[in-house]
Image (cartoon, helix red, strand yellow):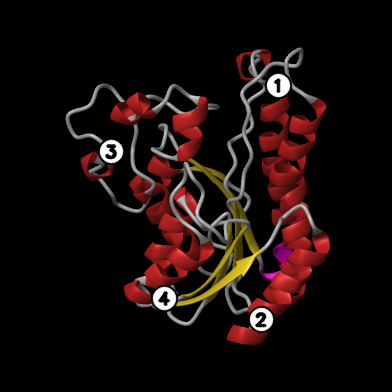
Amino acid sequence: MQSLKGKTIIITGGSRGIGREIALRCAKDGANLVIAAKSATEHKHLDGTIFSVAKEVEAAGGKALPIQVDVRDPEQVAAMAAEAAKTFGGIDALINNAGAIRLTNVENTEIKRFDLMSQVNSRAVLVCSQAVLPYLKKSENPHIISLSPPLDMDPRWFKNHAPYTITKYGMSMLSIGMAEEFRSKGIAVNTLWPRTIIATAAIEFELGGRRAFDRARTPAIMADAAWEILRSENLELTGRTLIDETLLRERGVTDFDCYRYNPDGGELMPDLFV
């Protein structure tokens, strides 16, 4: 397994939640973290900005570069990648973590909301991957990770929220294609998804409020799983649609109680698509 010390990792949507947690986990190894997100000022309902996470990364032992970027804008994304490479001397990994969610059916999904989900979810994987590709080709152990689910054509994943489902599945399909397309370039491409719901703003505002946190895990489990992927070498791990707990069990983890948001909470709730 390779150390992440000195490796440069771009995390989109890195100002809070799972993105923030991945950044802090990698910072413990001395990695360079590019915190790429829209959140440059405090939100009245959400904690965290690119600057607050950058400070946390530095305190944890890493180096940080906060960049305000809208992943829907190819020019902004290309400029972000160029600045990251100029600052740290290259790019070793991209984590497509930025996401948009609205769990509405076809009848009740506004077109502008579908456009947003399409652009921030599946389209951004294409935009960001294209932008970093020239730099990843020069890395010794390059990775792309997208936070998207395994593909499952069971109608239950489409009936109530098909617009969201297809934008997340699009991320996974692009990743499967890139894994094969980039294999000859030595670039590993995988997806990562949680087995249970994770205590994040998406769960709070789309799946029942903070009460759902009692049946959730913390973002730390996703961070540890991403860390394991990033440390994998020589295309040992590529082309897979991974589940956090399954991967960690493969790597020898047996105790998952530490990841519970509320140790005294109820039965863990499976995430969507699992």
Residue that badge 3 annotates: 261
> Considering only order in the chain, which callout, 3 or 2, is on the residue closer to the N terminus?
2
Residue 265 is covered by the magenta coloring:
no
| Residue depicted at 61% across the width and 23% down the height | 103
Q: CA distance from mark 1 to mark 2?
A: 37 Å
> Considering only order in the chain, which callout, 1 or 4, is on the residue closer to the N terminus?
4
Mark 2 belongs to which amino acid? Ala
**Secondary structure state at the residue bearing disc 3:** loop
| 152 to 23, vertically: above or below | above
| 87 to 19, vertically: above or below | below
In the picture, the disc for residue 162 is: 1
| Residue depicted at 74% across the width and 64% down the height | 77
Q: CA distance from mark 4 to mark 3?
A: 28 Å
> Considering only order in the chain, which callout, 2 or 1, is on the residue closer to the N terminus?
2
Mark 3 belongs to which amino acid? Tyr
Residue that badge 4 annotates: 3
The image position of residue 222, as x and y in percent, is: 42, 48
CB under 8 Å between discs 1 and 2:
no
Q: Main secondary structure of the magenta part?
A: helix
* Residues drawn in magenta: 181-186
Residue in the foreground of this view, choosing between 142 and 157: 157
CB under 8 Å between discs 4 and 1:
no
Q: Is residue 137 visible?
A: no
Q: CA distance from mark 4 to mark 1?
A: 40 Å
| Residue depicted at 74% across the width and 39% down the height | 116
**Secondary structure state at the residue bearing disc 4:** loop
